[in-house]
Image: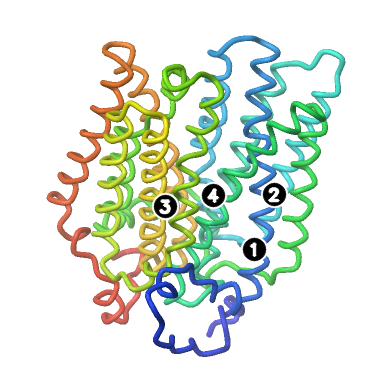
Amino acid sequence: MPLAMPNLPSDKPPATPPKRGWLHIAAIDIAPLRRHRDFRLLFIGRMVSFFGSMITVVAVPYQVYQLSHSVLLVGVLGLAELAALLAFAMLGGALADAADRRTMVLLSECGLMAGSLLLTGNSLLGHPLIWPIFAIAALQGAFDALQRPSLDAMLPRLVDREELASAGALGSLRGTVGMIAGPALAGVLVAVAGLPITYLVDVATFVVGLVCLLMMRAVPPPVDAARPSIRRVMEGIHYARSRPELIGTYLVDIVAMMFGMPMALFPAIAQGLGGPSVLGLLYAAPAVGSFIFAMTSGWTRRVHRHGMGVIVAATLWGVAIIGFGAVPGRTAALIFLALAGAADAMSGVFRQVIWNQTIPDSLRGRLASIELLSFSVGPTLGNFEAGVVASIFSVRTSVLSGGILCVAGCVLCAIALPAFRRYDERHWRSANTSPSPGS
């Protein structure tokens, strides 16, 4: 093993799984947490840090609206963050393949923490200013773009190959816990303690994340790492274009999100389902579905045709969105949104397994930046498409047509991408070769 890659996932051979009943098969597999110290540290640190970030995700637009009383400015806030993310994503991927990945995550985490400290300082002013909030949102978008490729590229170094599906499910569980608990606590903190304390809680969670990162071992760059450059970035893009299984993960996810993403319509839908009190339930329902899927995801490690798994999951997302748009009652609507969230989590697990099993270590950072762009652009375009259709026709027409187009688009992707549809990790593993960047 080259000296530049000293941190093996585990020095213990994978245990042969005993025969178990179906309840145990369905339950989430926590073996990666038990077997790998660094993965356990990363899991704990990211869970606490992401929980705090979700508090700020609620607090920032609330403060902008309170200061401006403008829904338009709240929407522009998201565009500022997205613009920074798009501008820095490819640089983040190049750096992830050229530097120690743990160090990259650590430094960008410090930058994100500094942003929350600046938000705290601005909220303590007698008359808080709006323009610094937009500047900080863009700054944090840039740091997120620099962090995510290194964070995603670390995972295959921290667990064994056969544990990637289980590790992905645990990551989904970690994220959904934050998406459910963070916004819920944010509402209480803003109402009871005020915005400065709310932002300081986020700062405190960053401290926990930083301590966990400092306790981890280094994750050095691959042995063939080179300095970041335009040529290195293009090398990653060319490799992605040459791999049909990767193109399939990007295209199917973009299709599903671009046509079947109705979150921009939630405020209008809430009006017909009971008013503002229902709005939070609409946002939380997909995360609840993702949580339930993660807790019952043990069966995913027995799936080998991950390309078909992604297609099926994205199709189920579209079917659930159709159901959400068709049913009249609040309870049924929330159930369909939860089903959509479960399907989205399923797609995420299988996409992550394909990326981590097929991408060479020397290219993981740059390919993670492409993946970051794909799942950031899709929902943004989807919310825009939903708003346009709803303004021309109606909210219900927008939701239903989006779900139908999502299902149709997934079927077309399955037909147009046979190599992706037939992708089987057992065939990939039996080849016993790692594709080179120039393949």
Q: Which residue is label 4 attached to?
A: 176
Q: Which mark is residue 272?
A: none
Residue drawn at point x = 68 percent, y = 50 percent = 49
Q: Earlier in the sequence, mark 1 or mark 4?
A: 1
Q: Nearer the viewer, residue 112 or 257?
A: 257
The residue lying at 25 percent from left, 70 percent from top is 424
Q: Which sits earlier in the primary sequence, circle 2 or circle 3?
A: 2
Reading the image, the residue beneath label 1 is 42
How many C-alpha atoms fall within 10 Å of the one at disc 4: few (<14), some, or many (≥20)? Answer: many
Residue 82 in the image: state x and y as whole percent. Answer: 51, 32
Looking at the image, residue 133 sits to the left or right of residue 91; the answer is: right
Mark 2, secondary structure of its residue: helix
Question: Which amino acid lies under the numbered mark 3 shown in the image of this protein?
Answer: Ala
Q: Residue at x 26, y 13 (%)?
A: 393
The secondary element bearing badge 4 is classed as: helix
Looking at the picture, does residue 35 appear above or below residue 392? below
Q: Residue 109: which numbered mark, if any?
A: 2
- Residue under circle 3? 345
